[in-house]
Image (cartoon, grey):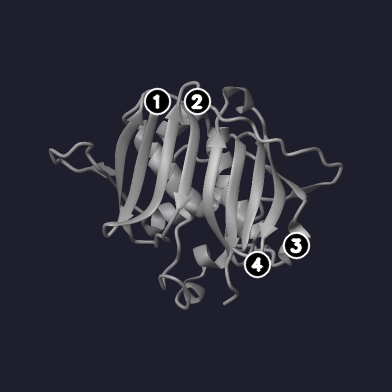
Amino acid sequence: MTRENTPAQPTPCVYLFDEQTHNAFLALCGDYNPIHADAGYCARIMTGKIIVHGMHIVLAAAEAWSTTHQEQPTRIKCKFILPISIGDEARLLEEKTGEHRWNIQVLVDDKTCATIMIAAGNVLPDKPKTGQSADILLIDNNPPAGDAGHLPLDLDPHEQCGKHFRLRVRNDAGSKLFPELNKRIGITATHAIATCSYFVGMVCPGLYSLCTALDITLDEKNRDQDALDFHVENFDDRFRIFNIHLDGAITGKLTACRRKED
């Protein structure tokens, strides 16, 4: 990760999504959806190359932000616009938009691929009410690497609506990839964000998935929680979008698209 020596304000940060960092993030999140792990599969879809995880983009931007700011993030909001592929060099353009708020544009070849808002201080939105469920499905999100039997789910979208899932969050992962961010939010929160990738890519929507947006809050009181609950609220047939609430090590919501079958 480098910063360009130009007089422009703000100075853009450059981040290379190379194969080494991609493989490290694969191991961190466990999301081996074929769009992130199968070059032959990817040759037929989207960019023709392996796609970088959306949560990798979020965490890379937050890591870059953390290298120049001492504040502790309390909210991260992201909208994914265009996919980024392995080998792409992204420019991260940061702009301060308020006393405790920054916007980051992630660009590849001058095209905006994601927009990220980072806020610090007392700016937390209301915690989402996910409701209680007597039937929480426990998901093993730490299978052996390369386990051929561990494949993304491919279920009817309406079968997943209303369900609650619980995934484990580790406090010993991600320290090498995002060291500065870990100092701000803790390793557990960093891994919880990465865990969102596992849920979208391997569970819901699963096989034919794309994460479209994320809006989370980061509270020090939740740092010691070792689980993250996902409540699949609904599926919008018109736009093929799942609305999913998060509660645990981080709180908030994410949206994910069930893309057309290949």
Up/down of 57 relative to 98, above or below: below
**Which of marks 4 and 3 precedes in the sequence?**
4
Residue picked out by circle 4: 148
Q: Quadrant of residue 256?
A: bottom right
Would residue 56 be visible to someone looking at this image?
no
Question: Label 3 sits on what residue type?
Answer: His
**Which of marks 3 and 1 precedes in the sequence?**
1
How far apart are the alpha carbons under marks 1 and 3?
40 Å
Relative image position of residue 180 (x, y in whole percent): 40, 32
Q: Looking at the rendering, in which quadrant would you find the C terminus?
A: bottom right
Q: Depth-wise, is mark 3 or mark 4 nearer the camera?
A: 3
Residue under the point 62% across and 66% down: 207
Q: Depth-wise, is mark 4 or mark 1 nearer the camera?
A: 1
Q: Nearer the viewer, residue 177 or 86?
A: 86
Relative image position of residue 15 (x, y in whole percent): 32, 48
The label number, if any, that marks residue 158 in the structure image: 3
The answer to whether the residues at label 4 and label 1 have Cβ atoms under 8 Å apart is: no
Question: Label 1 sits on what residue type?
Answer: His
Q: Secondary structure at mark 3?
A: helix
How far apart are the alpha carbons under marks 2 and 1?
8 Å
How far apart are the alpha carbons under marks 4 and 1?
45 Å
Q: Looking at the rendering, in which quadrant would you find the N terminus?
A: top left
Residue under the point 87% across and 42% down: 134
The answer to whether the residues at label 3 and label 2 have Cβ atoms under 8 Å apart is: no
Q: Secondary structure at mark 2?
A: loop
Which class describes the residues within 10 Å of circle 2: few (<14), some (14-19), or many (20+)? few
**Which of marks 1 and 2 precedes in the sequence?**
1
Which class describes the residues within 10 Å of circle 1: few (<14), some (14-19), or many (20+)? some
The answer to whether the residues at label 4 and label 2 have Cβ atoms under 8 Å apart is: no
Would residue 97 be visible to someone looking at this image?
yes
The label number, if any, that marks residue 254 in the structure image: none
Question: Label 2 sits on what residue type?
Answer: Val
